[in-house]
Image: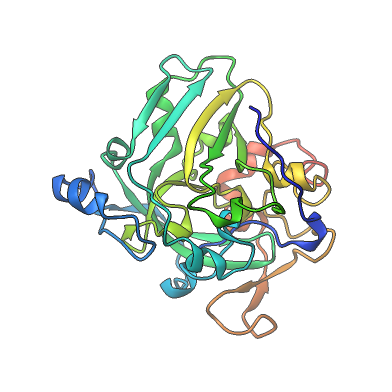
Amino acid sequence: MSFYRPPRVPASQITPEHCFLSRRSFLAAAAGGALAAAGSAAFAAPLTASKSQYMVDETLTPEKDVTSYNNFYEFGTGKGDPVANATDFKPRPWTVKVDGLVGKPKEFGLEELLALPLEERVYRMRCVEAWSMVIPWIGFPLAALLDKVEPLGDAKYVAFETVVRPEEMPGQSGFFQPLPWPYVEGLRLDEARHPLAILAVGVYGKTLPNQNGAPIRLVVPWKYGFKGIKSIVRITLTDKQPPSTWNLSASNEYGFYANVNPEVDHPRWSQASENRIGEGGFFGANRRPTLPFNGYAEEVAGLYSGMDLRANF
């Protein structure tokens, strides 16, 4: 994959990526006229989803914070830039191409993805910047999509790529840009197939707002938020570890695995504690200890048995 790499602001001067801010589908009304009207960042169509076993018993972060305080560099580097600058982004029509080492490569339309059984899952989200949220996502297991394309035996990794539309995403335009585009991410295949890994199409009972990664994004709750690539247009299975945008930009600061680990500090700040957004000021009483694997160690620690998690951060 080749793409233009514009001059970049040094990684030390910018803030890392991320933060946020059914049963069957949209029926004909939602998939038709309502979907066609969904170009506005303020537009939200209701989604029907079954309740999931994956629900943390913690106070939800206010929706206004989830949808207005987040990183999405394609719309700007400030926390308020995505909601301010995403109005002109058009998330429909949309397709996701799934290819590479698979038996049945395919390009999926959004309506087909919305027709998969949807679940609401309440997950913790931990940004690498040491702040966190609790978010009610709506989506489906990534494994369900991978099963449809039948990964081949030599597939070891899953690569993801976001859309490039500088005419709609002002963070991708101009001479000086903070990151190379398209934004890319990756997981090991066993991580991608883990039941906790989902492709989200909604939040707070509605379709994803533009600023939160509409119309489809990755959510892997045991990893730092920058792994949750947004506005996905391509998923490729490969036998080699794929590139990851923040790891390419500053490999000493952002590892490929990006597992939440309170014992491995970022070079410029501690990861031992975090600030829960929506519960007070950054230095207030809402600081809390960071949990290994963001509280999902029981489910996912076995994926990394025998690995040095300091070296493989």
Establish if 240 lies above or below 137. Answer: above
Viewer-closest of 253 and 141? 253
| Residue 283 horizontal/vertical position (percent) | 70, 83
Looking at the image, can residue 165 be seen?
A: yes
| Residue 290 horizontal/vertical position (percent) | 67, 65
| Residue 54 horizontal/vertical position (percent) | 42, 53
Q: Quadrant of residue 87?
A: bottom left
Viewer-closest of 259 and 240? 240
Establish if 193 lies above or below 258. Answer: above
Residue 105 appears left or right of 77 = left
Looking at the image, can residue 313 be seen?
A: no
Establish if 211 lies above or below 84. Answer: above
The residue at 60%/22% (across/down) is 238
Residue 194 appears left or right of 45 = right
| Residue 44 horizontal/vertical position (percent) | 30, 61
Establish if 86 lies above or below 192. Answer: below
Residue 45 appears left or right of 306 = left
The residue at 48%/67% (across/down) is 83
**Colour mode of the rendering:** rainbow
Residue furthest out toward the left: 28
